[in-house]
Amino acid sequence: MPIRMRTKNGPALAGLTWLAGLWAAPGLTATPLFDAHLHYNAEQRAAIDPQTILETLEASGIEHAVVTSRPPENARLLAELAPDRIVPFLGVYRAKADKENWMHRPDLPARVETWLDEGDYRGIGELHIFGEDRDSPTLKRLVEIAAERELVMMIHGDLAIIDRVFEIAPHVDVLWAHLGETPDPTILRAALSRHPEHLFIDTSVRDERFLDNDGQLLPEWRALFVDHPNRFVVGVDTYSLTRWQRFDEAAETIRQWLDQLPDSVARRLARENARELLLDPLLLGNP
């Protein structure tokens, strides 16, 4: 079953067989994953229809997935089609340029509140921001909104921003994307020591940082995951169309390094941490 791609004249079959390969690969879905970092942006939706996205997740053994999007309606659409699988986050960007300047737009918090009133979102983000903008009034208000509404904030930034978020709202839950701006076990240990309850960290698109050339976990990273088993989650991060087209490979890489951890730790990272952070407590009784 080739992936369904869209052209200017409507849907077309691109001749790629990656989705069929997912269904056929033995053992590929042996470990259910909760993917905590996916995008379904405008250019991706133009090329891949929503049903194919959901089929890809099913074929890859993704039992739940955080999806954020530009524009925000795309994530809501997937959640409406698969409410038991998709956990929508409110992406606050409507255009690519917003990624660079959202923190300087005083009108954004009001629009965010309107979007949140219109849709059932579990979080806000991904928000790209770094230390030089830590005093942004817009950032401050978005953090306050997340805390007021008990939403998770997905932050793509440095440690200065993480510290600032917790200065504003000490009890807000933060999902720090990509092992932070500078993936380093020493930095992450310090951050988790300062913020031991409400900071969670995703590993998306950082596998090469903690694996050697043979795909083995580096000792210092393995020790970090074992020492802090309740604070890490996994994600593919479909930041481009190619990431969706090669989704199975990225998911299998995650499974391969999870298999090198103690079973109890691997389960925490694979799904349990994200389930506890992001799902309604009433759903947690369902395996």
Image (tube, helix red, strand yellow):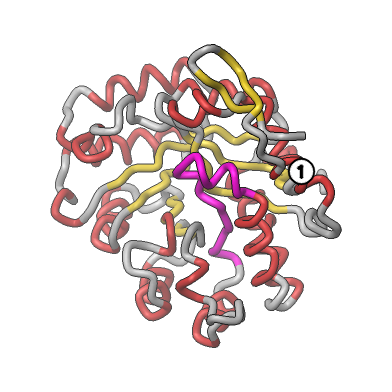
Question: What is the crowding at mark 1: few (fewer than 14 residues within 10 Å), some, or many (at least 20)?
Answer: many
Q: Is residue 145 above or below residue 184?
A: above
Res 58 quadrant in image: top right
Circle 1 is placed at which residue position?
59
Between 3 and 152, the one nearer to me in the picture: 3
Residue 244 is covered by the magenta coloring: yes
Residue 25, image x and y in percent? Answer: 81, 54
Vertical arrangement, residue 115 with respect to residue 149, above or below: above
Q: What span is colored magenta in the figure?
A: 230-247
Task: Tell me if 140 is positioned left or right of 135 in this view.
Answer: right
Is 72 magenta? The answer is no
Question: How many callouts does the rendering have?
Answer: 1
- For residue 219, what is the image quadrant? bottom right
Q: Residue at x 41, y 44 (%)?
A: 153
The front one of 68 and 110 is: 68
**Residue 280's image quarter?**
top right
In the displayed structure, would residue 227 be above or below residue 70? below
Task: Locate residue 82, reporting x and y percent.
Answer: 70, 27
The residue at 70%/46% (across/down) is 62
The x, y position of residue 104, in whole percent, is: 15, 35
Locate the N terminus and report the quarter of the image it occupies.
top right
Compared with 60, 162 (above or below) is below
The location of residue 270, given as percent across then percent down, is 67, 59
Residue type for callout 1: Ala
Residue at the extreme bottom? 219
Q: Is residue 228 left or right of residue 172?
A: right
At 30% across and 46% down in the image, what residue appears? 128
The kind of secondary structure element at disc 1 is helix
Which one is in front, 8 or 158?
Answer: 8
Residue drawn at point x = 17 percent, y = 27 percent: 106
As drawn, the residue found furthest toward the top would be 9
